[in-house]
Image: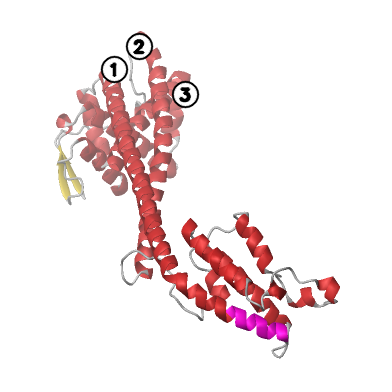
Amino acid sequence: MSVNVKEEPVLVPNCDVVENSELEVLNGDEESKLEDYGTCVDVITERVNQLEQKVVEVEQFYSTKDGAGQTNTSKSNSGGKKVAISQPSKCSSAGKEKTRGKHVSSPELMRQFATIIRQIAQQKWAWPFLEPVDVEGLGLDDYHKVIEKPMDLGTIRTKMEGSEYSNVREIYADVRLVFKNAMRYNEEKHDVYVMAESLLEKFEEKWLTIMPKLVEEEKKQAEEEAQDRASKQLAVEAAQAEKARDLSNELYEIDQELEKLREIVVQKCRKLSTQEKKGLSAALGRLSPEDLSKALKMVSEGNPHFPAGAPEVELDIDLQSDVTLWRLKVFVQEALKAANKSSGGGGTNARNNNNGGEMNKTAAKRRREITEAIKANKVKKAKKA
């Protein structure tokens, strides 16, 4: 890349840009105000850090939401709402019933199911199943080894009266368990086995009579729950959208504050002299290609129409703003210092340290603080865009 600088260069052995490193920001008694500007920059930086954390939270919310949406789409073939309902089937197993979507059955459905249990309990063969099995009285030493969860119709009735069941599927599973336990523990030819099998068959027939109403209730409740989840999701998304808008407004306010701070600092800075501009022009020609690209990028930040990435550009020093000139001056002197140091040339730095003293160090530190504040402002603008 070649750069034509429209300013007659003055080539001197020790360029002014490198030798005079002081950034004369304030004059006379106003120099003490520089610390206040540094404090302002610190406060703004802290606010920016807090806002960045909030931005990360918003980004995580939308990335998680998008990922979840893609997952749901891939798993759904129909694209509609997924409603877990049970189909009437006499062959439904107890294990499958327990995995159904749990819902709260209506009082009417619970009363109908209580009537069914009453009818089963009134059968002539129901007496062995009305109370818990008397394990000790009958001498059934291995009963609890074979039967993991004992159950009886009397216990079921007590739980129903105590409102321990929330839906009829739970009661259905326990009633089936009563008869399945008897069939598991006794042999097929045993009377208790035959009685349990007969009652279970009658119970399944009565169960099918209430299945249509149960399915309708479950479907309706599933739809209501889906609508409720959708409403909550919309509320969460609205809150996140409002949070994003607030963040955008706060970032804009911070950007305005930085702009005002930069204007104040620039107003307090003296303008570069003609000699300094010539020295800057000469120093730009001594930059490495990488540093030259960075310098041209600084120019483009102050002037968006400047073609920083073109193979050959023409830079008019006199048309650049004071902010751009100061940024270039500071950057160029630091880049050349680094180049001299890497090449082993330390004489200039030693001479600057001896002549400058502590005041020069303080001025250089303050210069870097102001420069970093201006650079941070540009970075935030780029992020916002």
Tell which of 129 and 371 is nearer to you: 129
Relative to 180, residue 251 above or below: above
Position of the C terminus by quadrant = top left
- Indicate the amino acid at tag 1: Lys
Q: Is residue 320 left or right of residue 356?
A: left
Q: Is residue 375 visible?
A: no
Callout 3 touching callout 1 (CB < 8 Å) = no
In 3D space, how far apart are the residues under numbered discs 2 and 1 (Cα atoms)? 9 Å
Q: Is residue 59 visible?
A: yes
Which residue appears at 62% of the width and 56% of the height? Answer: 161
- Predominant secondary structure in magenta? helix
Relative to 369, residue 229 above or below: below
Callout 2 touching callout 1 (CB < 8 Å) = yes
- When asked about the image quadrant of residue 300, the answer is top left
Disc 1 is placed on an element classified as helix
Q: Residues within 10 Å of mark 3 (few under 14, many from 20)?
A: few
Residue bearing mark 1: 268
**Magenta residues, start to end:** 191-200
Which marked residue is nearer to the observer: mark 2 or mark 3? Answer: 2
Which marked residue is nearer to the observer: mark 3 or mark 1? Answer: 1
Tell which of 285 and 229 is nearer to you: 229
Disc 2 is placed on an element classified as helix
Sequence order check, earlier mark of 2 and 1: 2
- When asked about the image quadrant of residue 327, the answer is top left
Residue bearing mark 2: 30
Report if residue 277 lies within the magenta region.
no
Relative to 58, residue 74 above or below: below
Residue 255, numbered circle: none
